[in-house]
Amino acid sequence: MGTELAKELAALDRLPMSKLRDRYAEAFGEPPSGNSRPWLARRLAWRLQERALGGLSERAKARAAELADDADLRVVPPRPGAAVTPAPPPAPAPADPRLPAPGTVLTRPHKRGVLEVQVLADGFEFAGSRYGSLSAVAKAATGSHCNGFAFFGLAGGGKS
């Protein structure tokens, strides 16, 4: 790197923010979108080095174009009121392998009776109420927190 470029890069740290913003607008042809001093200085240093030392090779540019899908890139968030396509809903989490198939009824002797819990596709049913986890069922049955898989004997991978 030439001494002139090194001096120019070192001078960026001493520039007041207003001059740094002006220098950025001059280098990039548009005003900066952010007010972060370190970000502006890094981007401006990159542009100065690019101009002095040359940018990416044609081969690198072609490879970057292959990898980039510009339609999905966003530098600035959309303005309020702009139409935004919603992201697809996340895929449901896979069921815990320790759980038996939906429809199975888990039984466990407890105090002077037997607890019966039906496994549903999206939770559990116990005593006429729906629960999201076996731990919630165990708490409803015992009144204290405990591991639902261990309580119902499923802690060993569903082999009980």
Image (spheres, rainbow, N blue to C red):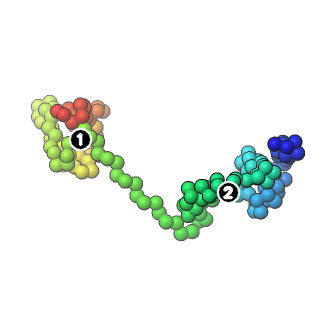
- Disc number for residue 72: none
Find numbered disc 2 in the image and state the secondary structure of the residue it sits on: helix
Compute the Cα span from label 1 to label 2.
Answer: 55 Å
Q: Quadrant of the C terminus?
A: top left
- In the image, which is nearer the foreground, mark 1 or mark 2? 2
- Disc number for residue 58: 2
Q: Nearer the viewer, residue 110 or 153?
A: 153
Whole-percent x and y of residue 87? 46, 60
The numbered mark, 1 or 2, whose residue comes first in the sequence reads 2
Q: Amino acid at mark 1?
A: Leu
56 sits to left or right of 88: right
Q: Nearer the viewer, residue 103 or 64?
A: 64
Find numbered disc 1 in the image and state the secondary structure of the residue it sits on: loop
Q: Quadrant of the N terminus?
A: top right
Residue that extends furthest to the front in the rendered view of this protein? 59
Residue to which mark 1 is pinned? 99
Mark 1 and 2 residues: CB-CB less than 8 Å, in contact?
A: no
